[in-house]
Amino acid sequence: MISQIHITNEKYRSERSMEIAAACDITANSISIVYYDLRLKRRYARTSLVGTSVTALNATKELARLLITSMREYNIGASVIKSVGIAAPVHIESVLDGELSADSLYLSPETEIFFVPYISAGISGRFTASLLTLPDGECVMADIGQSLYIAYKSDDGIVCAAFPLTGAFDGSGIESGMPAENGAIDAVRREKDALVYEVIGDRESIGVSPCGAAMAVNMMREEGIIDSDGIMTDRDLLYIGEDFFVSQSDVRAIQSDKARCRAAFEVFPRAERTFLSGEPFATETGLCAMLGLGALPELFRGAGFCRNSAEQGIIMFLESGETREKAADIARNARDITGELTDKFDDHYFNYLSF
């Protein structure tokens, strides 16, 4: 993964009210904050920190730093922040819940701090937040990133499972990798003899997104640069521009994670309606890349997209007490069936390792 720390800021509106909520989405290698106008019911601005390691030991400090710098950037006073909603990996959230306060974040004492509740030790509040965005009726949602999280929703309730991945699909396991944020190379293709790429935000590239890396591996597979066993046949690196590349170790990481994803879908309940959530792959381009790799079964062709689902779910969580109660109900009643699927999973994993 890229070693440089990058902070990006996006301002959506020029006007705002005096009632702002901060929706904080924390992963192992990034923090994003959406400033949401509670009175005008719209996003005001967003900031993100990527290229850092977020742990239980430094999460409070990193979150406070990002809040301070972005509030200064957007001229938001501490008294304007009425509430802060946080979704994070379970091991981070459990520590933050004990030490985080308005004072530790340099906010007004009246600011309310809320944590999106987690479902189990392996399924964090980030996925609870994503589930808040689902429509009514039977469906399956998949969130592919640091891990694969899957939920099956029906009239009988929600069952979930979590399958750890190696980091290929959140960028942390790719040598030039980064999350799908501004500056990430997010689409790679061959036009005649030239390798062309697109960058999120139409700005200078600072790394390769998981989708960009997946598309590069698909292209190499189609061109015979890698064989069915995932071995690069005529080179050690595929350069994307002058500074970034996909390596043999990157191919191996993608190969392993695509097999883990596909094996998980083989053992998990199915539904006709499917949704992809999260940043890296919840787009037409991302869906095509994952179908091309074989990481997703055909039932996901035509899937709906819940892009930024964790962020959107945290915003919904902050908007009303009714939604917070709904999140608590999901966390209480959703059943984690990961342990029930492990024995069947291993056989399918080895079957799907080849390209």
Image (cartoon, rainbow, N blue to C red):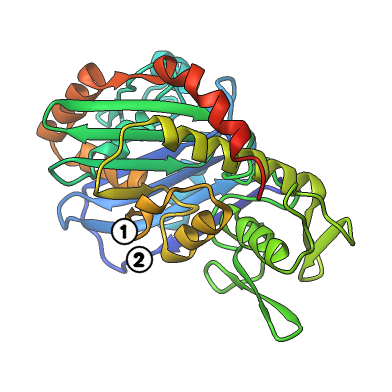
In the image, residue 165 above or below residue 21: above
Given residues 60 and 287, the one toward you in this image is: 287
Q: Is residue 25 in view?
A: yes
Location of residue 76 in the rendering, given as x and y in whole percent from the top left corner = 36, 51
Q: Circle 2 sits in a helix, a strand or a loop, which is it?
A: loop
Q: Is residue 3 in view?
A: no
Task: Tell me where residue 124 sits by quadrant.
Answer: top left
Given residues 168 and 268, the one toward you in this image is: 268
Q: Which mark is residue 242?
A: none
Identify the amino acid type marked 1.
Answer: Tyr
Q: Is residue 289 left or right of residue 318?
A: right
Rendered-image quadrant of the N terminus:
top right
Q: Name the residue under label 2.
A: 12
Instruction: Give the residue drawn at x 65%, y 38%.
Output: 256
Q: Do the residues labelled 2 and 1 touch (CB within 8 Å)?
A: yes
Mark 2 is surrounded, within 10 Å at the Cα level, by few (under 14), some (14 to 19) or many (20 or more) other residues, namely few
Q: Name the residue under label 1.
A: 44
Location of residue 52 in the rendering, given as x and y in whole percent from the top left corner = 64, 39
Callout count: 2
Instruction: Give the residue drawn at x 40%, y 64%.
Output: 11
Identify the amino acid type marked 2.
Answer: Tyr
Task: Tell me where residue 3 sits by quadrant.
Answer: top right
Q: How far apart are marks 2 and 1 (CA)?
A: 5 Å
Instruction: Give the residue drawn at x 56%, y 26%.
Output: 347
- Name the residue furthest bottom: 192
In the image, residue 243 above or below residue 156: below
Location of residue 125 in the rendering, given as x and y in whole percent from the top left corner = 35, 28
In the image, residue 14 above or below residue 56: below
Location of residue 307 in the rendering, given as x and y in whole percent from the top left corner = 37, 54
